[in-house]
Amino acid sequence: MNKRTNSNPSVFLGVLLVIFCLLPPPASAHQQTGTVWGFTSGFIHPLTGLDHISAMMAVGLWGAFLGETAIWVLPIVFPVVMAIGGALGVIGVPIPGVETGIALSSLILGIMVACGLRPPLWIAAVIVGTFAIFHGHAHGAEMPKAANAITYAVGFVIATGLLHLSGISLGLLVRWPLGQKLVRLGGVGIAMIGFGFLFKFISA
Amino acid sequence: MKKKVPTECRLLPLAVLLLAVPSTASAHSTVTSLGYFAGGVLHPLTTPTHLLVLIGLGLICGQSTPPNLQKPLSVFIPVSALALCFTLTGFIKSVYIPILVGVALVAGILIALQISLPWGITKLLFAAAAMAIGLDSAVETGNWIIVTKTLLGTWMCLAVIVGYTGYYISHFSKKEWQKIGVRVIGSWITAASLMILAFTLRR
């Protein structure tokens, strides 16, 4: 009886995995510039900070809580007002307490979601718009010098919008009682993240 | 008893070998190696400000149901052709970026707010956009055959982007949530245009 152990597919897969690990990564000796790098840099920027991500998700979650009109009003208002803040950051207009404002945005929006508060739509839009200024200013001021400004802006706006859409998608769970609890729990988490950042800035 | 090796496993060494093959070095832009017509076609697609304006115009066309393509394109296509022909004179090499971005900004606001302007004003917007993009697409080098081929590619691409975007957006935005999606994209165009304006003015 001739048993061949190497006929096992897992052995082949193991060998393949080892070879994958041995493949050399591309060399990146040069500074990345140009159109694609600008887009990538802009797209990644809102995704690299927990404070930004939590606030964007909270906007989407709150929009779903507020009802059908708010679902589209908030994600339209936020990017536009954020871009105004971003423009102020780019041209160097100082706004005091930007980091504190960003931390407060997570805290307050998280509380709104956690408590399931439903203020009139214009009040919600003012709250979201005010915080959007701080987020936009931070993004605009932190733009890498080497990045292509045009594609950076496009990537940054798309990533922010997609974060809102993620929040809205999760927020649609409010249609079910269990989902409503989960969304509120998410709001508690976001508020805690915001409180953590706020505490960090106050104690620093 | 001899166990049969599955075909997938027998192909694995070949797959590994293929992985080990070095990839092509891409030190130079691939656009230059294409034909001049294809280069012209790619020009609007690889110029972010042009693309922003063209998508904005397409979305404006698409927001109306049934699609209102004939009127805007009857202005956009001839004006862009005229502007592209004007670049042959060499008087204008490029257009000031804030002008292009300003057109995208106006288009974005109109889409986000879902405003349908009177036909005369819409015609002006499409004419201004066609003029700005056309004048910004000048070909700097080459004999007249090269320049003509390139400009022809650009002209066709401009019309195709606006026309197809309008047509498909109109057909795929019949439900309420789809219309909201178009308005959200309009707000993204507005936001991106605002940021680009700031970047440009900072310089």
Image (spheres, coloured by chain):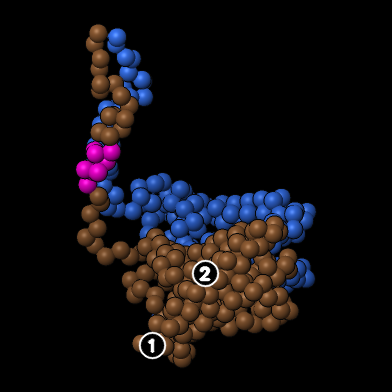
Which span of residues is magenta-colored? Answer: A17-24
Task: Name the residue located 57 percent from the left edge and 74 percent from the top edge.
Answer: A110
Compared to residue A51, the image places residue B41 above or below, namely: above
The brown one among the chains is A
User: Which residue occupies the foreground of this view, B127 or B47?
Assistant: B47
Disc 2: host chain:
A
Indicate the secondary structure of the residue bearing disc 2.
helix
* Image quarter of the C terminus of chain A: bottom left
Proximity of marks 1 and 2: CB atoms separated by less than 8 Å: no
Task: Name the residue located 56 percent from the left edge and 60 percent from the top edge.
Answer: A166
Q: Amino acid at mark 2?
A: Gly
Give the image location of residue A191, x and y in percent. 53, 75
Residue A12 occupies which quadrant of the picture?
top left
* Image quarter of the N terminus of chain A: top left
Residue A150 shows up from this direction:
no
User: Which residue occupies the foreground of this view, A105 or B61?
Assistant: A105
Disc 1: host chain:
A
The blue one among the chains is B
Residue A203's disc is 1
User: Which residue occupies the foreground of this view, B144 or A155?
Assistant: A155
| Mark pair 1, 2: CA separation | 21 Å
Question: Could you classify mark 1 by the number of other residues whose Cα lies within 10 Å: few (under 14), some (14-19), or many (20 or more)?
Answer: few
Give the image location of residue B183, x and y in percent. 67, 65
Question: Could you classify mark 2 by the number of other residues whose Cα lies within 10 Å: few (under 14), some (14-19), or many (20 or more)?
Answer: some
Give the image location of residue B42, x and y in percent. 47, 53
Compared to residue A92, the image places residue B185 above or below, namely: above
Disc 2 designates what residue? A189
Task: Name the residue located 42 percent from the left edge and 88 percent from the top edge.
Answer: A202
